Image: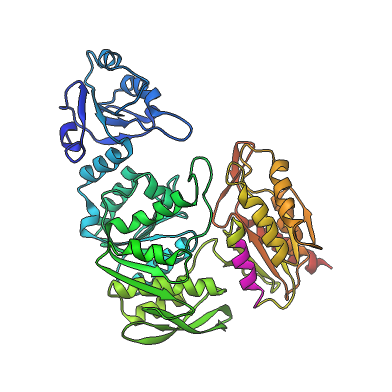
Amino acid sequence: MQAKTILSETPYQLVAGELTEEISGIQLNSSKVGCADAFVAMVGSHSDGHKYVSGAIDNGASLVVIEDGQTVWTGEALAEMVKGKKTAIVSVPDSRKAYADMSCTYFGHPSENMNLIGITGTKGKTTTTYMVQEIFKRGGRDCGLLGSVENRICKTRHEWSAHTTPEAWEFQELLHTMQENDVADCVMEVSSLGLKFHRTRGVHYKVGIFTNFFLDHIMSGEHADEEEYFACKMMLFDTCEIALVNKETRRLDEVLAAAQKCSKVYTYSISGEADFMAKDITFEAQDGVPGMKFTLVTPTYSQELFVPLLCDFNVDNALCASAAAYLCGIDQTAIREGLAHVYVPGRMEKIRNPLGLHVYVDYAHNGDSLRVLLSSLRKFCKGRIITVFGCGGERSQYRRSGMGESSARYSDYSIVTSDNSRSEPLESILVLIKEGINKVEGAKYEVIEDRREAITKAVSMATPDDFVVIAGKGHERTMEINKVKFEFVDSDEVRKAIDKLANVGGEQ
């Protein structure tokens, strides 16, 4: 596609060169730029992409996009850089918006011919997307999935992107790939940062879903405060046909007001009147698998459903997924079968084992998520709740004391350990976690810095009446400590610990 064509849907001013070269890719990293690539310079939270314009030109960029008002280069310097080269430079009002517009143009706006379901909210996005995809599958419709665990098209798992919501070029390329494979439906997680940074700009959603709103992601590099975080979430409704809103969310009136931009607005609730409701919620085990049973009430029918996941919040997720499927024309049999067979890696993932122990791996990585998880499990636990958790470095410090207090208040025993400390000293993270724990008088806990040892200790002290929760990392397959990443999967470590324990028991 010619440079002039790829810019046809975004405002720009030509700074230097001619827009005649072909473009076959767009890069945000100058070191990845090659011939026939465009380079878009963005101002990030840690670096200014304009500093790397000369490198992109040296690497053979056919087009360089800079932002109006950038102060790194003068017009004369830019003109000198491209002298004798086949590089054009344009200036745009907003680099992020231009990047999204160019990506949509290149791939031909694939979302316009798809039924796209976008889910935003602080919690529940991942689990709900898996439920929706399984329901569509049971209904005979291939459904793509984009999210924080993986990107999936048909039976192919694509490499997970660096963000929950992929950058615009990758996002549009994935949608285009779905279109080429006759996948007309897609469900995706839409993060607040994805909305803030316009990664989803130019897409049309059949259904836009708002699950809930808690205080998280408020820190340098993410959101300045609660109001910015909330405003970014509300951007989802700018391009939705149908809005689906959880009536249990904080700031409900404001959410519903924002949803009025859509042509239709529906609500769902597990505890009150709504367009879609869950009633008669009970714990049940089917074929030896523990889960939740409830009655789904829709505008036209009611039916009994089972989801093989514990806790009321998973009924909330199942209700949301059922409502979304209903609004997309999926029949009730597919909804029932889809929920009954759903599997979500790292979300209340029960680790089956020969010792009959109740061990769960979950992604809960802030105080609110851990509180909801542990308080819900209390209803089903006959013995103790033993929780293993840590907190990530270079992330919101509010999570640390929050997780400490939640574990102390809702667990019988806490084991504090490491969790992606990144470049931060583990001790500085542990200090704040312990501050939260100490808010609960008499809380029982210990610190085992090695996460593998912490998991082994929790499993070894458990009885079949206890619940062991390994929280924080969920589906993640690596851990980063002192800037070094290495393979570490909580579910695998649990299985190793249980195997070791089972073998020791067999030798006695």
**Is 371 a magenta residue?**
yes
Locate residue 227, reporting x and y percent.
Answer: 45, 51
Locate residue 299, reporting x and y percent.
Answer: 32, 83
Q: In which quadrant of the rendered image does the C terminus lie?
A: bottom right
In screen coordinates, is 212 left or right of 504? left
Q: Give above or below for 34 relative to 76.
A: below
**Is 192 a magenta residue?**
no
The image quadrant of residue 263 is bottom left
Q: Give above or below for 221 relative to 373.
A: above
Which residue occupies 29% across, 53% down?
A: 175
Q: In which quadrant of the rendered image does the N terminus lie?
A: top left
The image quadrant of residue 28 is top left
The part of the chain drawn in magenta is 370-379
Locate residue 273, reporting x and y percent.
Answer: 42, 81
Locate residue 97, reporting x and y percent.
Answer: 29, 41
Q: Is residue 297 visible?
A: yes
Q: Give above or below for 73 relative to 161.
A: above
Q: Give above or below for 216 relative to 129.
A: above
Q: How many marks?
A: 0
* Residue closest to the eye, 345 or 414: 414
The image quadrant of residue 92 is top left
Which residue occupies 35% across, 54% down?
A: 235
In screen coordinates, is 426 left or right of 6? right
